[in-house]
Amino acid sequence: MKKLSLLGSTGSIGTQTLNVVRRLSRDGGFPVNDAAVKIVALSAHSNIELLEAQAREFEPEVVSVFDESAAKAVKIKLADTNIKVLSGISGLCEAAAWESADTTLNSVTGMIGLRPTLEAISAKKDIALANKETLVAAGALVMAAVKENSVRLLPVDSEHSAIFQCLEGSHDNKLKKILLTASGGPFFGKTPAELEEIKPQDALKHPNWSMGAKITIDSATMMNKGLEVIEAAWLFGVPVEQVEVLVHRESIVHSMVEFADNSVIAQLGVPDMGIPIQYALTYPERFPSPAAELDLTEIGNLTFYKPDYNNFKCLPACIEAGRMGGLAPAMVNGANEEAVRLFLEGRISFAAIGDIAEEMVKRANKRETYALEDVLEADEEARGFARSLI
Ligand code: NDP
Ligand code: MG
């Protein structure tokens, strides 16, 4: 039985992961023993009502609550159980590397996920990764730690799960290109004047996927796709130049790979994160899933377009940062995290997010080799830079 530490259990990916775990472990219909998952640790920031309900249902050994006062409240709520309650970044790291866990699924949002990922890897846990910011900001550290500790890094992000699946059975054949698909978000085709008018409530509506606020804004600005280009480069060992972004409005082809003979392999399915989450937990086996069957005759047409690099500046900013390497991706990621926060607080315009990313790349630190402290410093500097522009 897989023993899972789930970071960010109260979020969009976290709750969907628990749906998968519930089905794999309890609902009948397929060989439960092979696929069952036991939750040993749960972590959240401050949503204590939901965390308490999850703790009572899944009975982990430990829960970690980032916010100190929320952690105190959880301790009181769970006083009638044997569940240990931790707090702060140290609690998050301890839960990530929890002794009885064999796998850690990291679905917290943003750079805060970096230390827990590294701690879990050092403790020889396999990593199922949704927290893409971690890999973007410190890919060299994460990939080196994965290699050194001989653990598995399994993608949860739907595009990267697709690429991973397309590469299964490719033997030693080298990838020529990754074709990374993008829904284009809710503002595909909008003019700069229209983009200027966008308010947080407009950007928080995604046409195909239901996700947390930060990634929903990143999808609207196409920052998400930029982060995913860098994420793909690290996961599959290719330069960013070999990752081509294609806008695919239907979100049915989740990504493709091209080989030397120009043969292209694609992975398709309805847009349902349950599929990649489940595959990351049951890899290399597959089990039935409640996701809808793909009916291509109902969909009829699959369309593909080139992205609009002029109006969606976050995408070229990330590609440039990925090309530069070193701390540039950490800086563009940090500046974006801050810009998204400022936009959601109504303090900057939607278009300003792209301007901040573009400016950040121009000033990014080009140092190639780095340690964890350098990444955290670069992140802080980038956040300060974003704030200085308002
Ligand atoms: P949500 O905002 O829905 O959830 C974030 C989760 O992280 C919550 O459980 C939150 O806790 C927790 N969290 C935030 N900060 C901390 C902290 N400091 N310590 C501990 N826990 C913390 O985000 P999503 O689930 O949408 O996204 C999570 C990650 O997965 C992101 O990196 C995103 O890019 C990636 N991803 C998401 C996809 C999706 O479909 N949603 C698809 C592919 C990737 P609390 O509820 O208490 O605030
Ligand atoms: Mg994705």
Image (tube, rainbow, N blue to C red):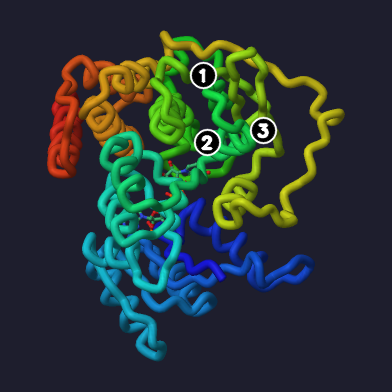
Category of crowding for the residue at label 1, using alpha-carbon neighbours closer than 10 angstroms: few (below 14), some (14–19), many (at least 20): many
Q: Is mark 2 within 8 Å of ligand 2?
A: yes
User: What residue appears at the point 69 percent right and 70 percent down from the top-left corner?
Assistant: 32
Residue 103 percent location from the top left of the image: 45, 61
* Residue 324 in view in this figure: yes
Q: Is residue 282 above or below residue 299?
A: below
Dot 3 or dot 1, earlier in sequence: 1
Q: At x 55% / y 58%, what residue is drawn?
A: 17
Q: Secondary structure at mark 2?
A: helix
Relative image position of residue 297 (x, y in whole percent): 86, 28
Q: In the rendered image, is residue 223 in sight?
A: no
**Image height of 300 relative to 107, above or below:** above
In percent of width and height, residue 134 lies at 33, 42
Helix, strand or loop at label 3? It is strand
Q: Are marks 2 and 3 in contact (CB under 8 Å)?
A: no
Q: Which numbered disc, 3 or 1, marks the residue closer to the eye?
A: 3
Of pointers 2 and 3, the one earlier in the residue sequence: 2
Residue at the location (14% across, 27% down)? 388
Q: CA distance from mark 2 to mark 3?
A: 10 Å
Image: 185 above or below 370: above
Q: CA distance from mark 3 to mark 1?
A: 15 Å
Q: Given the image, on which type of amino acid does mark 1 rest?
A: Val
The disc at residue 132 is none
Where does label 2 land, which residue? Answer: 160
Q: Disc number at residue 245?
A: 1
Amino acid beneath label 3: Gln
Mark 1–mark 2 Cα distance, whole angstroms, equals: 13 Å
